[in-house]
Amino acid sequence: MAGYLIKDTTKEERQKIVEDSLGNISANCDGCMAGLAEMYQDYIDGKKEIREINMEFNTKKDKKL
């Protein structure tokens, strides 16, 4: 795999990247943040880069503080 960018990956590769990164894609583990796996669905679907999703998450988190 060449990289993590949408243009460099297939949908299947992006799914694996997210699964490997989260460790538990079903998010059924104790202490897992609800919806964490769903947060990256736009990346898997090729709509947003991981960087964009993380930036949006961090912006929302900062606004709550």
Image (cartoon, rainbow, N blue to C red):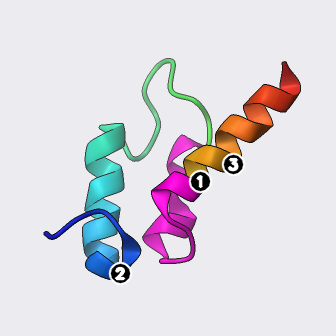
**Residue drawn at the location 49% of the way across and 66% of the way down:** 43
Total labels: the figure holds: 3
Kind of residue at badge 1 = Ile
User: Cα distance, mark 1 to mark 2?
Assistant: 16 Å
- Percent x, y for residue 23? 30, 37
Residue sitting farthest toward the right: 64
Name which residue lies at 28% across and 74% down. 12
Amino acid of disc 3? Glu
Q: Earlier in the sequence, mark 1 or mark 2?
A: 2
Residue drawn at x 78%, y 27% as measured from the top left: 62
Instruction: Name the chief secondary structure element in magenta.
Output: helix
The magenta region covers 36-52
Q: Nearer the viewer, residue 31 or 15?
A: 15
Determine if the magenta segment contains residue 63.
no
Q: Amino acid at mark 2?
A: Lys
Whether tag 1 and tag 3 are in contact, CB under 8 A, the answer is: yes
Q: Which residue is mark 2?
A: 7
Q: Is residue 35 left or right of residue 15?
A: right
Residue situated in front as seen by the camera: 47 or 37: 47
Q: CA distance from mark 1 to mark 3?
A: 5 Å
| SS at badge 1 | helix
Which residue sits furthest left?
1
Disc 1 residue crowd, few under 14, some 14–19, many 20+, Cα 10 Å = some
Q: Is residue 18 visible?
A: yes
Say whether disc 3 or disc 2 marks the residue closer to the N-terminus.
Answer: 2
**Residue under pointer 3:** 56
Q: Which quarter of the figure is the N terminus placed in? A: bottom left
Q: Secondary structure at mark 2?
A: helix
Residue 32 position within the rendered picture, expressed as x and y whole percent measured from the top left? 50, 27
Q: Provide the residue designation for mark 1.
A: 53
